[in-house]
Image: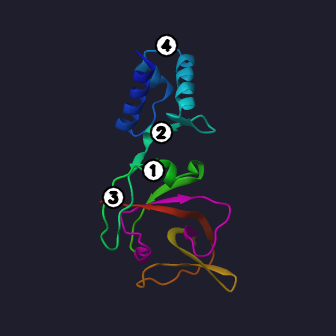
Amino acid sequence: MSYEEYKQRVVAFYRRHGRMPGYRELMEMTGYRSKNAVFKLIGKLVDEGVLKKDARGRLSPGKFGGARVLGVVEAGFPSPAEEELLDVMDFDEYLTPNKESSYILKVKGDSMIDAGIQPGDMVIVERRATYKPGQIVVASVDGEFTMKYLRQKNGAYFLEPANEKYKPIYPSEEFRVEAVVTAVVRKY
């Protein structure tokens, strides 16, 4: 089997399963009998940019994982459409550049609809050392979690919804910001 065939099998595995194969799975796919041979293959795929390896040695897709960015679409007045390959975008890299500190939550409730966050949407959140008023955050308030705008008044923090049906939340005991919302994902 050629190197190109190995590469195609890795890409096919990722597209079929939505994850990278482990060493044992790579051994089965390639017919290699040792992890050392698989390690060398992975090194070649990383060098070529087909795969990426994080600090912990976990694999993620490289060049093959993205979608083509073909141009710009007018959301106002119609304009002539031209298809032009502008770039290739890896959504995983674009949405979660800090994978170690990011995670995804499914939205329940309508308190953030005026911020464009609907029930059923997925939000990508990132743990950070500091948070600023005006950011949409996930916070623990008196033992319960919620997502709202972080606001500050007279030196005290509170949470403000983006729906006039709801009132701001002023913590009475415990208040801790857990993460900041960095992206919203919605499928139609």
Is 18 on the left or on the right of 50, as rendered? left
Highlighted range, magenta: 111-140
Amino acid under label 1? Phe
Q: Looking at this view, is 55 or 141 the one in front? A: 55
Amino acid under label 3? Lys
Is 156 on the left or on the right of 105, as rendered? right
- Label at residue 91: 1
Q: Tell me the quarter of the picture where residue 149 sits.
A: bottom right
Q: CA distance from mark 1 to mark 2?
A: 11 Å
Crowdedness of circle 2 by 10 Å Cα count: few (<14), some, many (20+)?
A: some
Q: Position of residue 89 (x, y in %)?
A: 45, 49
Amino acid under label 4? Arg
Q: CA distance from mark 4 to mark 2?
A: 27 Å
18 is within the stretch colored magenta:
no
- Label at residue 33: 4
Q: Position of residue 161 (x, y in %)?
A: 48, 78
120 is within the stretch colored magenta:
yes
Residue under the image location 54 percent in, 19 percent down: 35
Crowdedness of circle 4 by 10 Å Cα count: few (<14), some, many (20+)?
A: few
Query: Label 3 belongs to which residue?
Result: 187
Q: Nearer the viewer, mark 3 or mark 1?
A: 1
N-term mark: 1 or 4: 4
Q: Is residue 85 something one can see in this rendering?
A: yes
N-term mark: 4 or 2: 4
Q: Looking at this view, is 100 or 138 the one in front? A: 100
Q: Nearer the viewer, mark 3 or mark 4?
A: 3
